[in-house]
Image: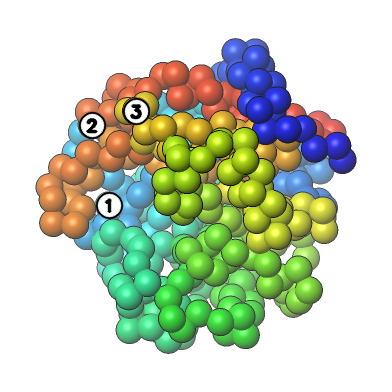
Amino acid sequence: MTRIKPKHMFRIFTFTCFFSSYIAQHTVPNIAYPLSTSSRWIVDENGQRVKLACVNWPSHFQPVVAEGLSKQPVDAVAKKIVEMGFNCVRLTWPLDLMTNETLANNVTMVVTTLGNNDVMVILDNHLTKPGWCCANDDGNGFFGDQFFDPTVWTAALRKMAATFDGVFNVVGMSLRNELRGPKQNVNDWFKYMQQGAEAVHSANKNVLVILSGLNFDADLSFVRSRPVNLSFTRKLVFELHWYAFSDGNLWATSNPNDICGRVLKRLGNRGNFLLNKGLPLFLSEFGIDQRGGNANDNRYLGCLSGWAAENDVDWSLWALTGSYYLREGVVGMIEYYGALDSDWNSVRNSSFLQQISLLQSPLQGTTYY
């Protein structure tokens, strides 16, 4: 494949935004569930491609309820998600959710309402103890940490998968968010992630099984030479995260084309190679400060958008959140990476949504949704 220079990719991205936005907002969902994989693509039961254009909806904080429901009814939020061009929600949850039936029922309500609005759901086990994520020393980072018992985790995954067995719009389960910390190692990754994948599949054979990498989900390089060994096929997806702040302030202080080239080379080694191996790669978190004044984020977005358009990857924006019930001891904290404003009704930055509209439409494959 001929690689387009980042600056040219960004131009292509910009020029086609309006047309693609129209397509994304005028496509009637017509998906034959369940989903599976075909080479590097996610497809429906008829073999037609389904592109995930998701937004993260956090529900892993101390209240263990989907954020924003004190501001707007769940149906209003679901309709706003569709209005903004997203077809999917990555709904985050803590392991402790599975020990409280009342809280679990709240998740079911959200999933059902999203399904009524033709929105797909990926259930993401974000951490064990409810709260803000993530740090190397928070006890949630890797198997064997204080709050990360592999046996408890596997049982919770199995229970969550069983709870939504037969729920058509729950299309995938992400096994664990941002593995990290001093205990992380490749051998335990394979041991436990394979166990978790088998637990999910045994309880629900209709969901995609999504595996995250090491180092805050920035590194999947170790699966290049060592394949994941599972009893099932056509259900495995890998996920990766990419933020500007992972490279400090380099986007703002360096030549953006130079830093883009270096980061894309690193991305190729740590995850993009999966596409060439015929394996789906889901960019399950990316995002920017949507107030618009962060040069580091804005330059990174041009590079990311070009890469994502060229490779036509599935993705999930961080985040939907306009504000939080309670984050790090602060009531009502505003999330400036949020697509919605603090009222959970207004769009925070319509220009940003216009920018990513190209990415909401499939650009490659055979038949699209």
Q: Earlier in the sequence, mark 2 or mark 1?
A: 1
The secondary element bearing badge 3 is classed as loop
Q: Earlier in the sequence, mark 1 or mark 3?
A: 1
Q: Which residue is mark 2?
A: 342
Q: Is residue 170 visible?
A: no
Q: Position of residue 121 (x, y in %)?
A: 51, 47
- 73, above or below 140, in the image: above
Q: Position of residue 16 (x, y in %)?
A: 66, 17
Q: Which residue is mark 1?
A: 65
- 188, above or below 327, in the image: below
How packed is label 3: few (under 14 Cα within 10 Å), some, or many (20 or more)?
few
Q: Position of residue 224 (x, y in %)?
A: 76, 68
In the image, what residue occupies the spot 46% across and 31% down?
298
Q: Is residue 127 visible?
A: yes
**In this rendering, which labeled residue sits more in front, label 2 or label 1?**
2
The secondary element bearing badge 2 is classed as loop
Q: Is residue 250 left or right of residue 138?
A: right
Q: Is residue 229 left or right of residue 213?
A: right
Q: Which residue is mark 3?
A: 293
**Foreground of the two, 99 or 177:** 177
How packed is label 1: few (under 14 Cα within 10 Å), some, or many (20 or more)?
many
How packed is label 2: few (under 14 Cα within 10 Å), some, or many (20 or more)?
many
In the image, what residue occupies the spot 34% across and 28% down?
293
